[in-house]
Image (tube, coloured by chain):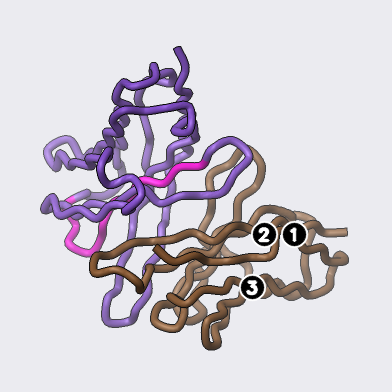
Chain colours: A brown, B purple
Amino acid sequence: SSELTQDPAVSVALGQTVRITCQGDSLRSYYASWYQQKPGQAPVLVIYGKNNRPSGIPDRFSGSSSGNTASLTITGAQAEDEADYYCNSRDSSGNHPDYVFGTGTKVTVL
Amino acid sequence: QLQLQESGPGLVKPSETLSLTCTVSGGSISSSSYYWGWIRQPPGKGLEWIGSIYYSGSTYYNPSLKSRVTISVDTSKNQFSLKLSSVTAADTAVYYCARHTVVVPAAMSWFDPWGQGTLVTVSS
C-alpha cells in the first residue's frame, strides 16, 4: 500500500494560523479525512471530504487539497487545539479498498 | 447518539489469537450506509487501519495483516468482532472500533465516531 507523509511536529503561537500537510499519491484520487487525538483519548474526526466539518467542530478548522497534498488549517489556534493530527485516505494502488493513515503531526500551541 | 464500545481480554499470550468485540448502541449496525472498522495504535506510535466490514459480511483488510485477520458481524447483537491470529509483541496496541463511512462517487471516506479503545498487551 502507499504511504501518507506528514511533518512530525509543528508549533503555532496562540491565536495564529497553522497548516498541517499530508502528502501521498492516493490524494490525487481520494479526499483525505483528518483526526485530532489528545493524549489518552480516542481520535476525533475534524474534517472529511472536500472541506466538511462534523457537528461540534469549530469553524477554525478547515481542509483543502491540491495534487498529491491535503492540508488541514487551524485559523486562530487555541490552547485546546494542541494535539496529534492524522490524515487518512483510501489507497489507490491496489485492486481492493485499503485505507492508510498518515504518519501524524504533533501540534504545539505556544 | 451512536456509541461504540470495545471489549475483550487485555492480555494475550504470544502465538495465540486476539479476539475483540465492538458493541454498537444508539443505531443499527445493519444500516446500508456504513461499514464498521477496526484501527489500532501501538504505544507511542501512529494509527493503523486493520480492516472494515459491511453489515452483509463483505470485508476489506489491510494487506499487511490480511493473512492473520478475520472480521465478522453479528447483526442480531448489533456487534462486530476482530480476530487476529499468531500474535506477537508487535501486536501490542490500543484497538479502536469505529463507524466507517464510504462515499464512492465522491471519493471520500471517514471514521466517526470511535470507541474509547482497549489496550491489548501480548506477553507471556
Q: What subunit carries mark 1?
A: A
| Crowd rating for badge 1 (residues with CA inside 10 Å; few <14, some 14–19, many 20+) | few
Q: Which residue is mark 2?
A: A105
What residue type is disc 2 on?
A: Thr
What residue type is disc 1 on?
A: Ala
Q: Is any part of residue B2 visible from this angle? A: no
- Callouts 1 and 3 close, C-beta under 8 Å: no
What is the distance, in whole Å, between disc 1 and disc 3 at their CAs? 11 Å
Q: Is residue B109 inside the magenta stretch?
A: no
Residue displayed at 29% across by 68% down: A94
Q: Which residue is mark 1?
A: A9
Q: Which residue is mark 3?
A: A21
| Crowd rating for badge 3 (residues with CA inside 10 Å; few <14, some 14–19, many 20+) | many
Judged by its main secondary structure, the magenta piece is strand
Residue displayed at 57% across by 80% down: A69
What is the distance, in whole Å, between disc 2 and disc 3 at their CAs? 9 Å
Magenta stretch: give its range: B30-41
